[in-house]
Each structure stands twice: as C-alpha cells, then as structure tokens.
C-alpha cells in the first residue's frame, strides 16, 4: 500500500518502516514489567486499555463540536468524520470546552489512565492541563520531532500518551515512532543537540525534519507504526522521535496527545493553568531548522 510519510511516498512495510508495534496489554497490572518494557522498547502500546464505548462516546462529542463549527460534510452520518470541502476544523488544542468535556476528559485524564502513570512512576502522577486534541485534515501531517523541544522545562520523567478517537490507520495519519532514537548510541548526537533545544527559546518550529525516513537512513533504526483502534493508548518519552503519516483520506483524523509526570517533579509552567497556550511557530520551508541542523552537525 502506498502511503505518504512527510514529504515521501512510501510502501508499508518497506526498508526503514515497519507495520507492527509490540502490544504490551498483557502487562497491565504488572507495573515493574511495564516499566521494563518502556525502558527496553522506548514505548508501551496498550491495546484495548479504555473501554471502546467510552472512547466512541468521546468521539461523538468531538464530532458534534466539529459539526457545530461547520467543519463536517453535511450529508455524512453522525459518526462520520468526513470533512466539508473548503473548511478548516476549529482549533481544539488547549480548548477546555472540548478537551475537558466530561466524556473526553475521562479518556484523557480519568482514573484509569492516571492510575497507569502512577504505576509507571511508582508515585502520584500529574498531567498538563493543556491537551493537544487534533482533527487532522486531509493533506496534513506532523513532522519528525521529539517532545522535549516543546515541553522540556519541567520534569525529565515526563511521558506522552497518544490516544486515537476511533480507528486510525496509517492512511488516516497514524503516529509512527522511531524506537532507539531515545536511547541508542547512534542517536546520541541527535539527543545531545536537537534534543536539548527549546523551540520557544531558540525560535524555530521544533520539527527536526519533514522527511522522517532520512533519519533512519543516516542514523539507523526503523520507524514503526500500526493501525490503532479506539481504546488503544501509546506511551513514550520525551526523546523518542515521532511523526505522523499524511492524512490521505477525506476524513479528519481524531486523536489527542496528553502528558503525565511524577507529581513531585517540577512542571513546565507553559502547559498548566488557565492561560496554558502554545506559541504558534511556523518554519514552513524549514529555513531556521536547516541552519540549526548545520550548527548541530546533523
Ligand atoms: O498526532 C500527531 O500528529 C502528532 C502527535 C505528537 O506529536 C505527540 O504525540 O507528541
């Protein structure tokens, strides 16, 4: 199947791109084993972590929000996320009226998921108030990056949790990870240069590249992706390089990324409290990033 990853057409699977990720759901309830798996693989995928009906209920709420904004095709059924041509979806990132709607909030920061992070940290967990709730439109994607460049001013033990609201196939824009980028010697220079940058402080967009495959061609490893089902959650750390496929369908890809950390650690104040907001930085042609990469020797 031909898909698009960043600026490249790709086959899945193909060199540098695998279509499977390891499911660790059998380890739920065994905190030590989950921690070991996170250390070993750099990520933990938990299939069926949330009851499907709870996630689909939250999806309906998100779809109603998009419909109210006139962003959905009018003749589509109520469960369809088909886009209305010519309209952009409303921004849902950091918008409590939708991210903290009870049905959505339960999936994003309810007791089960908070409990998962308490097990991973072996202590009370805290989440950012800001939630990156996305309706990713056809043609859109996320470039390869590490989350440290956006939220690295607080806990060094911060973890990301990516949550699909509905089935998310690679064609719809599934997330892909580059396991090993968070720990292997081959990526050490990437972690010590790019990984220590701060997109706000350094004034650039934060994506390392629009072409994720160039990274595995230079530094080794394999991008991994899968089709995510409603109820699945994917956990990974701040130095894990990740990206999302181009959405080549006519539907919105609905997903959210949220963050958890040990409650006793310092927190990145940009993402908590009522004023939590994102600095909009665009480096479309990647001019600033290209200059920084030269300076980093990447
Ligand atoms: O969903 C996406 O497109 C990107 C997600 C992401 O960057 C993250 O989970 O940190």
Image (cartoon, helix red, strand yellow):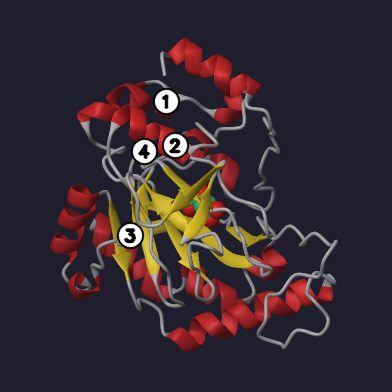
- First reached walking from the N terminus: tag 2 or tag 1: 2
**191 horizontally vs 154: left or right:** left
- First reached walking from the N terminus: tag 3 or tag 2: 3
Q: Secondary structure at mark 1?
A: helix
Q: CA distance from mark 3 to mark 2?
A: 22 Å
Q: Nearer the viewer, residue 110 or 163?
A: 163
Residue lying farthest to the top in this orientation: 295
Q: Is residue 159 above or below residue 211?
A: below
Q: Nearer the viewer, residue 132 or 63?
A: 63
- First reached walking from the N terminus: tag 2 or tag 4: 2
Residue topped by disc 3: 124
Kindly check if marks 3 and 1 are in contact, taking CB atoms under 8 A apart as contact.
Answer: no
**187 horizontally vs 211: left or right:** left
Q: Callout 1: few (<14), some (14-19), or many (20+) C-alpha neighbours within 10 Å?
A: some
Q: CA distance from mark 2 to mark 1?
A: 7 Å
Q: Is residue 57 visible?
A: yes
Q: Is residue 248 above or below residue 239?
A: below
Q: Position of residue 17 (x, y in %)?
A: 35, 49
Asked if the residue at label 3 sits under 8 Å from ligand 1, the reply is no
- First reached walking from the N terminus: tag 3 or tag 1: 3
Q: CA distance from mark 2 to mark 4?
A: 6 Å
- First reached walking from the N terminus: tag 4 or tag 1: 1
Kindly check if marks 2 and 4 are in contact, taking CB atoms under 8 A apart as contact.
Answer: yes
Residue topped by disc 4: 239
Q: Secondary structure at mark 2?
A: helix
User: Residue visible at 35% across and 32% down?
Assistant: 217
Q: CA distance from mark 3 to mark 1?
A: 27 Å
């Amino acid at each position: 199947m031909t898909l698009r990853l960043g600026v490249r057409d790709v086959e899945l699977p193909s060199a540098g791109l695998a279509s499977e990720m390891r499911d660790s759901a059998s380890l739920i309830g065994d905190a030590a084993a989950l921690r070991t798996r996170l250390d070993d693989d750099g990520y933990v995928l938990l299939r069926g972590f949330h009851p499907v009906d709870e996630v689909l209920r939250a999806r309906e709420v998100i779809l109603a929000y998009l419909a109210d904004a006139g962003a959905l095709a009018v003749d589509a059924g109520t469960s369809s996320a088909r886009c209305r041509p010519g309209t952009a979806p409303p921004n849902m990132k950091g918008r409590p009226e939708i991210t903290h709607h009870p049905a959505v909030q339960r999936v994003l920061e309810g007791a089960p998921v908070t409990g998962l992070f308490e097990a991973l940290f072996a202590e009370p967990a805290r989440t950012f108030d800001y939630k990156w709730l996305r309706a990713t439109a056809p043609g859109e994607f996320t470039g390869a990056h590490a989350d440290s460049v956006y939220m690295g001013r607080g806990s060094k033990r911060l973890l990301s949790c990516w949550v699909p609201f509905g089935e998310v196939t690679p064609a719809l824009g599934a997330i892909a990870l580059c396991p090993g980028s968070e720990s292997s010697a081959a990526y050490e220079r990437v972690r010590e240069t790019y990984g220590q940058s701060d997109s706000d402080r350094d004034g650039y967009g934060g994506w390392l590249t629009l072409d994720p495959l160039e990274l595995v061609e230079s530094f080794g490893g394999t991008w991994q992706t899968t089709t995510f089902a409603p109820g699945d959650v994917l956990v990974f750390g701040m130095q894990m390089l990740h990206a999302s496929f181009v959405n080549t369908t006519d539907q919105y890809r609905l997903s959210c990324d949220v963050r958890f950390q040990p409650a006793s650690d310092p927190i990145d104040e940009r993402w908590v409290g009522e004023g939590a907001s994102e600095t909009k930085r665009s480096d479309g042609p990647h001019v600033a990033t290209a200059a920084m990469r030269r300076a980093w020797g990447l």
